[in-house]
Amino acid sequence: MPTTLTALVTVEDYKVLPETGPRYQLVEGDLYMSPAPNRYHQDISRNIEFMILKWIETGGGGRIYYAPFDVYLDEVNVFQPDLVYISAENSGILTDIGAEGAPDLVVEILSPGTRRIDLGPKKKVFARHGVKELWIVDPEPRTIDRFVLEGEAFATAEQFSEADSFSSVILPGLTIVGTKVFEA
């Protein structure tokens, strides 16, 4: 049986996609279209962004960005995480086209269209490239899994429910309150 070779999509290919079309992500050389998230997904994203933004404005420092915002990790991986936090010390990765390097914190909110790639290849690539902390937010059953980088892989997650609160070493002094995260 003959082998069919398919070329990987690269950053150069990604950069010529239309800005006004659907949102795309480049994951291990494969192009994925990301449908617009539902309203509850947007509520969760806004709630987390608001908590982190208030923390930044009261002296925490750094910057937060929300999708669509390109994070270039290598020649075959360009992601649009739901939220990214970049510390002041790591601000050198910010460019006119997005971020070229690993953010300090990435937040992914699961949806039916992105669940498989968020939990699989993207999680591995984030760890391989040095994202210090990853939060996976699952709207149902209203949980947040917090992964911390240890070496080149994420440590076993701490899972928090809607009833819990937690803190992050990346965002010292900020308490994430579960009920506020999942407030619609």
Image: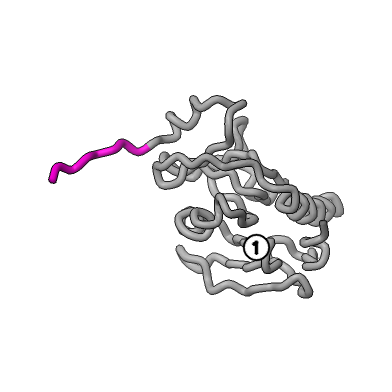
Closer-to-camera residue (102/21) = 21
Residue at 49%, 45% in the rendered image: 73
Residue 60 visible to an observer of this rendering: no
Question: Is 132 left or right of 10, judged from the image as shown?
Answer: right
Is the C terminus in the top left, top right, bottom left or bottom right quadrant? bottom right
- Predominant secondary structure, magenta span: loop
Magenta-drawn segment: 1-8
* Residue lying farthest to the left in this orientation: 1
**111 versus 31 height, above or below:** below
Q: Where does label 1 land, which residue?
A: 138
Question: Residue 68, position in %: x, y?
Answer: 64, 39
Q: Residue at x 58, y 39 (%)?
A: 70
Asked if residue 110 lies left or right of residue 142, the reply is left
Q: Can residue 182 be seen in this snapshot?
A: yes
Display colour scheme: one colour
Residue 172 at x, y = what percent? 75, 64
Q: Is residue 28 left or right of residue 85?
A: left
The picture quadrant where one finds residue 141 is: bottom right
Instruction: Please say whether residue 6 is one of the residues in the magenta stretch.
Output: yes
Q: Say what amino acid the circle numbered 1 marks.
A: Asp
Q: Where is residue 131 in the image (x, y as percent from the top left)?
A: 55, 56
Judging from the image, what secondary structure is the residue with disc 1 in? Answer: strand
Task: Name the residue: 79% across, 54% down.
Answer: 47
| Number of numbered callouts drawn | 1
